[in-house]
Image (cartoon, grey):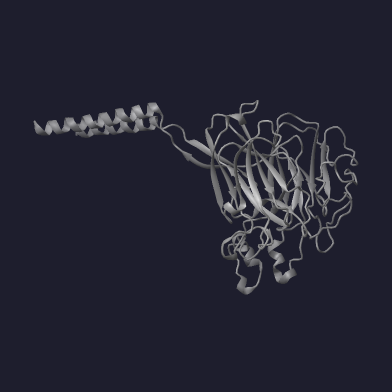
Amino acid sequence: MMFSLYRMKFIAIVIALVLLAINAPNSYSQSCFPTCRSDDGRFLNITEGVGFSTLTPSVLNIRLVVPVEVESFRLGIFDGDHLNGANGEFHWDNGSPITPGTYLYVLKSDPDRDNNGPIIFQTQDTDLLDNDWVDFDIFNDPGAIDDSGNYVYTFSIILTNGVSSSNSFKVRTSQGQLVIEEIFTFIANATGVFDLPIIYPNINFADGIGPDDLVGATYDGTFTFNFQLRDPALELEFWDGDTDRGSFDGTGTDTDDLNTPNVIPDFAPPDSDVVAEGVNPPNPFDDLNPAGSDGFNLLFLRSPAVTYSIIFPDGQRYTSENPSGDQEWEKFSLSTQTSDPNLVDFSPSQIPAGNYQIRFEGLDMGNFVSVNPPFPIQIVGEPMITSEIPTISQWGLISISIAIGIIASSVIIRRRKKVY
């Protein structure tokens, strides 16, 4: 009985020491654009050439900010190929497989944030995978440290051969934050029979397209982007482009926005297919005819017609009910200084510091949408905790060593008692 008591004490001591030895878990977080999931059909996009209408240039620059205490990180690209799938099977992209666009992915040290700097890493679409992530280990460059003490890089995705094409992809980093400070395009895409079963896990092509095929869909018509105001603001301005607002039945179509000038805005890239703001009917319709194309439109339709909201830190929503039509830019403006509808859409009492969201709803699949962030605000990538791994400190190792010593000593004592 006495020995059992001693043994219980030893076990209790060992458990306590082991618990002391283990530090709090380290959270390994990643930032993704536009999302971390590989099955939701949400992508950043570069589109160029005849047959496509685009409001963005053939280069996209994404800022990557990494904490100075981090030695290295992983940079990931999802579906970075362009029409290079095996056996004629490719995903998410549009264009000609015979003459596909050529895309270069370049990471540069850029503490000045001017999209220039020494190249740290580069790869091209032919070295990347179709419908899968490829991650690259990057060691931080001391030359990338900015005035705030963080490493700052620019990751540029570049169409190099000018071929008419549309490249949909995602980007992620294992450390730090992805940031977009310029015009960009996004899309929920499905380019054919290889993509649809990913978005619709219960689809059955054999019996036609019906409501049962939509059950469990991974895309629900929403896109969410995050940004932060470090200080209270008097005004907040956001530009949306080419949302193709309007339904096939003529309802909810684009109108001439009161507070957007009927001109091409100065920030519009000169080589884009932009037109002046006005009444620009959708092309294609944002809300497709669900009976069209023998029911296939039902797979791309997300009702109601597209809108988006700016969501304040306290949950207040200010919604653009009639965003841009075809190939135009339209302004959505909030101001604490005026309520004149010829100048602003909403006049909140305050625009506080904090974390905000821009949330699109009712966005059909296959509809390119461009946005111009509310400068100088940065749109940040989706954060996601990938794992939590307990770590053992130096004192923890000492504690475990002591515990092992105690156990070993008890075993020796027991053996000696048996011998003598």
Residue 122 in the image: state x and y as whole percent.
60, 44
Q: Is residue 80 visible?
A: no
Q: Is residue 135 left or right of residue 410?
A: right
* 173 vs 52: above or below: above
Residue 101's place in the image compared with 354, above or below, is below
Residue shown at the point (20%, 33%) measured from the top left: 411
Q: Quadrant of the C terminus?
A: top left
Q: Is residue 277 above or below residue 283?
A: above
Q: Residue furthest left?
A: 420
Q: Front-most of 356 and 39? A: 39
For this rendering, which residue is in front, 246 or 370? 370
Q: Give the image location of residue 393, x and y in percent.
A: 41, 29
Q: Quadrant of the N terminus?
A: top left
Q: Looking at the picture, how far across and down is residue 119, in whole percent?
A: 62, 38
Query: Can residue 46 be spotted in the picture?
Result: yes
Number of numbered discs:
0
Q: Is residue 133 left or right of residue 158?
A: left
Residue at the farthest bottom position: 207
Can you tell which quarter of the image residue 111 is in? top right
Residue drawn 83% across the image and 56% down it: 252
Q: Is residue 122 left or right of residue 3?
A: right
Q: Residue at x 59, y 64 (%)?
A: 89
Q: Quadrant of residue 358?
A: top right
